[in-house]
Image (cartoon, rainbow, N blue to C red):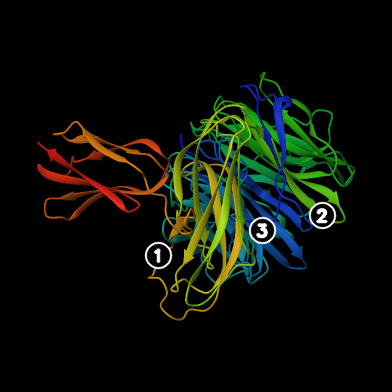
Amino acid sequence: MKNWLKVFTLGGVFFVTLAIPAQAQWSEAVLERVTSGPENDHLGYRSLALDDAGTLHLLYDRWMGGSDHDFYYKVKPPGGSWTYNVPIGDLSASLLSPTLAVNPLTGAAYTVFLQNGALRLGIGNLEVWAYNDLPVPGNPPLFHPALAVDGNGYAHVAFILQNPNGTYYIGYGYWDGQFHFQLIANSELGPFGSGAAPDICVTSDGGVAISFRGGTYQMYRVDVAENFSLGLLNWQINTVSPQDYQCYESSINAAPNDDLYLAYSGDMGWGFPGHVFYAYKPNGAMQWGPSTDITGTFSGVAPKLALSNDLSAHVLFEERSGNILTGNICYAANLSGSWTAQYLQQGDKYNPSLVMDGNGNGSMCYEQYIGAGNQDIFYFGYVEGISPLPNVTLALTPSSPPIIIPSTGGSFSFTANLQNNSSDPAVVDVWTKVILPNGSPYGPIINVQNINLPGGGSRARAFQQFVPASAPAGNYLYIGYAGDYPNGVASADTFAFTKLGAGGWGLGAGEWLCNEIREPAGQMALPLEMKLAANPNPFNPSTAISYQLSAYSYVRLRVYDIAGRLVQTLVDGWREAGGHEVTFDGADLPSGMYFARLEAGAQSQTQKLLLIK
């Protein structure tokens, strides 16, 4: 299975990955540092997400000082490494309160946040993100947005809003191409309602459940508002927490069968121990079941709840001494039918986020205080891979940095070195892209597949990259990837270059050519001998077209009809020496004669193909 990733780099964060069998045995987890200061990297209420392909998604807030916050996104595909950072939102704007969700089927990432005080939704796929404004009538002050995504790809958002009279309420809206806003009736909050911290989940039939801190100062409780079908205005609100506790943060999830699960924290007043509670509501029930104290011997607050496919519940919470967090993170689970709690991470660690996969494997991330006012992010969790990626390292070394391309276009050269870190042979793909000044990716430019490396072996090649005059002015990032094209990235490396203002003609628009440098310099590799064949031929409806290269070459393999019109491009990129095979599918084409033309360097061959239906 292919894995995918997003790439940009502006700093580091810590994360933890865990390899555990079905009972979530965190003793086998692996710890990774995901970001690295000197800036402060912080996690939101939900900062970690997992899709069905096993890819982990992370969104974090880099506090730059004062009111300056920057948001970054990165992923970890199965068996791969954490990617570079993708900037999220307008980094020149005032950004606050990011939260993350994914569509588990498609792997698309969603984030909702406040930009200059307004609600904004981002949807990302690889390096490309699209943004949508989520307008709230009257533009009231907004706080603490929460996010969930349903099976149709609709984004559901809960948040706190303040009316002109100063009253706080829970607001909700769903986005299906436009934003449908509701003010939840009977959700009025107390005078400090901006801290009501909602959480949200969706059910399979489009229903929504929102948990939040209801009540008022010194009478706080946890309420759950439910809407049982998409777009309905009739919300049912139940109080879940016991009357003798002041209750605050909550975390809510829906199981595949639409049962609801809730974890929340509370205490009996200032300075009293914190308790973490768990409650359950079967699908179709009108009331929540009784709450269970799952804290054990600890004093806990700020729970984060995740479910496994076996419907076991897993909760992280932060330990508190008096009214001060200790920096220790605890873990509670009901794997045996009763709840047990234990330390999971200790010492200057805060604000964890938790996900579970279908096999009971857990992953968490947390902030850690490193010193000198610096918070970094760590990952602790499972490391199993669906398709293990090769253990290789790719290094890109530009020849003469800094690289400045004139307005008329130009070129630069660099060396790509690929190292197999394992004693076993590896088959590796290598490809490159550029990130344009507006943050959009372009490429792949180089795309070399099925490179065979012996155990401990390496391969180095020099390239000349052309930049057209039509390329926009600004700062670029050149990125090289090694792994399983297009999404399984085992290693990546980057360097920067700058293109000056447009002017002159230079190369034609979009011609980002990249040639391997050999003797004489600048020549593309030419095969000494080519062989092209199709089997079967005649065929119906598809045939395997094989070709043989005696040298590493830039290859184009195209199919034309009898009038010379291009029908399909089967190959367009660098290929290693040796045998290759691709399939030409003529299921949608009429019977007749076609021509497969292979071009490698200055040489070409043509093979007749006869489609008979």
Disc 1 secondary structure class:
loop
Say which of marks 2 and 3 sits in front. Answer: 3
Residue 393 makes an appearance in the image: yes
What mark, if any, has residue 10 been given in the picture?
3
For the residues labelled 2 and 1, say whether their Cβ atoms are less than 8 Å apart.
Answer: no
* Residue beneath disc 2: 374
Type of residue at label 1? Glu
Disc 3 secondary structure class:
loop
Q: Position of residue 443 (x, y in %)?
A: 45, 56
Height in image: 98 above or below 285? Answer: below
Say which of marks 1 and 3 sits in front. Answer: 1
* Residue beneath disc 1: 511
Type of residue at label 2? Asn
Q: Position of residue 423 (x, y in %)?
A: 62, 27
Q: Position of residue 201 (x, y in %)?
A: 55, 44
Q: Position of residue 519 (x, y in %)?
A: 48, 54
Q: How many neighbours does mark 3 have within 10 angstroms: few (below 14), some (14-19), or many (20 or more)?
A: few
Residue displayed at 58% across by 26% down: 424
